[in-house]
Amino acid sequence: MGEARVQVKLINAGDEVMVRRGLMIETQVRTYEAIALVDSGAVSTVLPVEVSRKLGLVTVDQRVAQYAIGYQEVVDLTEPVAIVINGRKTVEQTMILGDEVLIGQTVLETLDLHIDCANHRVIPNPAHPDQTVNKVK
């Protein structure tokens, strides 16, 4: 497992849809930037409640979150959020808990990023540094 911190831009994906449909102007899209903890031991993306509120996200479901110590709790799951790291973008639902933005394996896999543990940074997959490549089989 590895950890690093990285600049991340979070975007209300529903707002982006509204812009594409001509129902909202681009300057109204709600965004949030943070230095996020990227942890290969985590699966999902996690947002603190205040970040979710700033993005105007709605809770659409609930999931069970299991912590490293084995404790479990039911937490809220948001509508889709766009996540931009190192110029690469994906969209996924996020869990609401904690006090910092946490990026897990699903974003790393989707964006084809690796954690460089020796230098505590997130880098593109060396096999395809110029573009995201996702396995489909």
Image: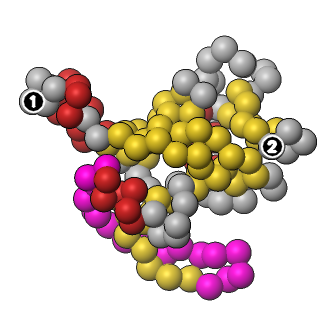
Q: Is residue 9 above or below residue 46?
A: above
- Residue extending farthest to the bottom is 71
What residue appears at the point 65 percent right and 32 percent down from the top-left corner? 112
Q: Helix or strand or loop: what does disc 2 sit on?
A: loop
Label 2 environment density (alpha carbons within 10 Å; few <14, some 14–19, many ≥20): some
**Is 132 positioned to the left or the right of 55 in the image?**
right
Percent of width and height locating residue 83: 47, 39
What residue appears at the point 54 percent right and 60 percent down from the top-left corner? 100
Q: Is residue 127 above or below residue 120?
A: above
Percent of width and height locating residue 115: 76, 41
Residue linked to disc 2: 120
Residue linked to disc 1: 23
Dot 1 or dot 2, earlier in sequence = 1
Here the colouring is secondary structure
The three-letter amino acid code for the residue at tag 1 is Leu
In whole angstroms, how far apart are the C-alphas of marks 1 and 2? 41 Å
- The residue lying toward the viewer, choosing from 91 and 116, is 116
Q: Is residue 129 above or below residue 68?
A: above
**Is 98 positioned to the left or the right of 38 in the image?**
left
What residue appears at the point 62 percent right and 85 percent down from the top-left corner? 71
Does the magenta segment cover residue 36?
no
Q: In the rendered structure, find residue 7 and report the number of the disc placed on it.
A: none
Image quarter hosting the C terminus: top right
Which of the 4 quarters of the picture holds residue 72?
Answer: bottom right
Number of labelled discs? 2
Q: Which of marks 1 and 2 is in front?
A: 2
- Magenta span covers which residues? 55-71
Does the magenta segment cover residue 57?
yes
Percent of width and height locating residue 43: 61, 57
Pointers 1 and 2 in contact (CB under 8 A)?
no
What residue appears at the point 30 percent right and 59 percent down from the top-left corner? 53
Q: Is residue 66 above or below residue 33?
A: below
